[in-house]
Amino acid sequence: MNRFAFIARRLLFAVPLLLVIVFLVFMLLQITPGDPARAVAGLRASEADLRAVRHQLGLDDSVFVRFLRYVNDLLHGNLGYSFKSSEPVSAMIGERFPITAWLLVSGILLSLAISIPAGILSARRERGFADTITRSTEMVGLAMPSFWVGIVLVLTVALPTGALPAGGFGEGFGGHLRSIVLPALTLAISVAPLQIRSLRASVLAVRGRDYVTMARTLGISERRVTGRFVLRNAAGPSVSLLALNIGFLLFDAVIIESTFALPGLGQGIVLAAKQRDIPAIQGYTLLFAVIVVLVYLAADIVNAALDPRMKVES
């Protein structure tokens, strides 16, 4: 089947996968120790109060009925209500999601701005000075944990110069932009070494292909050969690697948000875990899982678009 059929099959495969994720997230409430009714009513609630709360939450229904109700609520955009604040979980996520989106998008863009030139330069000058420096730097980058990188940036950039804030998300677009620079750079430094290594290996593999040699023989400039033939065909593995690392990036975002006091999804799920706020944990977990699935799906679509020769055996 052609690449369009491949994309359609991936879209269809995502549906049952999302249903499995929804079921596992729903079971989180069922297997968590403790009584959800007690968490809502309080430690001093009487048995009558607990029975009333269980009935209100639907906990006296069967697991199957509760699962169907949970799916129906999700289809209507209802993620439940926080045990602690009684606030809709969807509203809590809506307040925090833009901050995490700022961090992830800016961090990924910065990592691409670092890794693409470095990977191409390293591959074009294999075993040369630039290649040696790039490979040594990427090894150092892989060895540095993100929280340590964040602290170093705060101590060496934010505090001495005052040019960028050491924490918080600022006010207005300008404040947001200034506040996200150091967290995004921290995220980029964490992920760029893997992208550089992957892109370098892919470029080296593609540069020796016959069609690249033919393009050079025809007198096409090296810049056009690199952009049109080498980079496009070498980008597939790097796109897949970036997609595979999205779970790592989300975990890294939790650490970076804590380091820079960003009130995003990472701090939200940490706070919900401390408070044993199960509906909030379910909402954050479901969102993270859906993001991972959608990123994997997007990576497959991008790879299919980059490689027009893509054929999939039926």
Image (cartoon, rainbow, N blue to C red):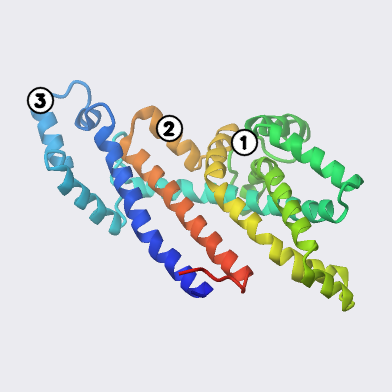
Examine the rendered structure and indicate whether residue 72 appears above or below residue 160.
below
> Does 46 appear above or below 217?
above
Relative to 73, say whether 306 is above or below: below
165 or 312, which is in the foreground?
312
What residue sits right under mark 3 in the picture?
A: 47
Residue type beneath disc 1: Gly
Element type at mark 1: loop
* Residue 91 drawn at (x, y percent): 37, 49
Name which quarter of the figure residue 160 lies in. Answer: top right
Instruction: Say which of 64 and 163 sits in front.
Output: 64
User: What separation in Å lies between label 2 and label 1 (alpha carbons)?
Assistant: 18 Å
- Percent from the top left, x then y, of residue 199? 72, 54
Number of residues whose C-alpha sits closer than 10 Å to that of mark 1, classed few (under 14), some (14–19) or many (20 or more): some
Confirm or deny contact between disc 2 and disc 1 (CB under 8 A): no
Q: Amino acid at mark 2?
A: Leu
- Between 301 and 114, the one lying in front of the other is 301
**Which residue in the rendered view is the most extreme toward the top?**
44
Q: Mark 2, residues whose alpha carbon is within 10 Å: few (<14), some, or many (≥20)?
A: some
Mark pair 3, 2: CA separation: 29 Å
Is disc 3 in contact with disc 2, using a CB cutoff of under 8 Å? no
Look at label 3 and name its amino acid.
Glu
Quadrant in which residue 59 is drawn: top left
Q: Is residue 237 above or below residue 307?
A: above
Name the residue beneath numbered marker 2: 271
Q: Secondary structure at mark 2?
A: helix
Dot label at residue 143: none
